[in-house]
Image (cartoon, grey):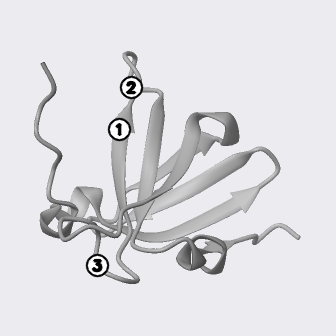
């Protein structure tokens, strides 16, 4: 049985991504509640959802994944937002 997909437009601040940095093999994800999470590049997936319940343009969300809580997905409204959103501060 599959559960209903979450409405990504209504995520709380803990799930709203404000910045994503990339350095070496690690992504640094900052959420609207001020928390900073470091996630190994192989454990973070980038996805899009253009449906009516998908994230607002320019307002990606992070969703936990994996049975051990060590993986996550960041959902964007369009593919074009992904590379524009990720900054590489250690270049």
In this picture, residue 44 sits left or right of residue 60: right
Q: Earlier in the sequence, mark 2 or mark 1?
A: 1
Report the residue at 27% width, 57% height from top: 15
Extreme-right residue of the structure: 91
Q: Position of residue 45 (x, y in %)?
A: 55, 45
Depth check, mark 3 against mark 2: the one in front is 3
Res 87 quadrant in image: bottom right
Q: Position of residue 69 (x, y in %)?
A: 38, 25
Report the residue at 63% width, 81% height from top: 84
Disc 3 target residue: 56
For label 3, the SS is loop
Disc 2 target residue: 69
Of 62 and 39, the residue lying toward us: 62
Do tag 2 and tag 1 residues touch (Cβ < 8 Å)? yes
Quarter in which the N terminus is drawn: top left
Could you give the CA–CA distance between mark 3 and mark 2, rounded to whole angstroms? 25 Å
How packed mark 2 is, by other alpha carbons closer than 10 Å (few <14, some 14-19, many 20 or more), is few
Could you give the CA–CA distance between mark 3 and mark 1, rounded to whole angstroms? 19 Å
Q: Position of residue 58 (x, y in %)?
A: 40, 83
Res 52 quadrant in image: bottom left
For label 1, the SS is strand
How packed mark 1 is, by other alpha carbons closer than 10 Å (few <14, some 14-19, many 20 or more), is some
Disc 1 target residue: 64
How packed mark 3 is, by other alpha carbons closer than 10 Å (few <14, some 14-19, many 20 or more), is some
In this picture, residue 59 sits left or right of residue 70: left
Report the residue at 38% width, 69% height from top: 60
């Amino acid at each position: 049985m599959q559960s209903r997909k979450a409405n990504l437009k209504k995520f709380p601040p803990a799930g709203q991504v404000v910045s994503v940095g990339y350095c070496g093999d690690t992504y640094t994800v900052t959420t609207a509640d001020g928390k900073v999470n470091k996630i190994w590049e192989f454990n973070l997936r980038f996805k899009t959802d253009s449906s009516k319940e998908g994230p607002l343009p320019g307002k990606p969300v992070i969703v936990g994944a994996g049975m051990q809580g060590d993986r996550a997905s960041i959902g964007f409204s369009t593919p074009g937002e992904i590379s524009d959103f990720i900054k590489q501060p250690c270049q």
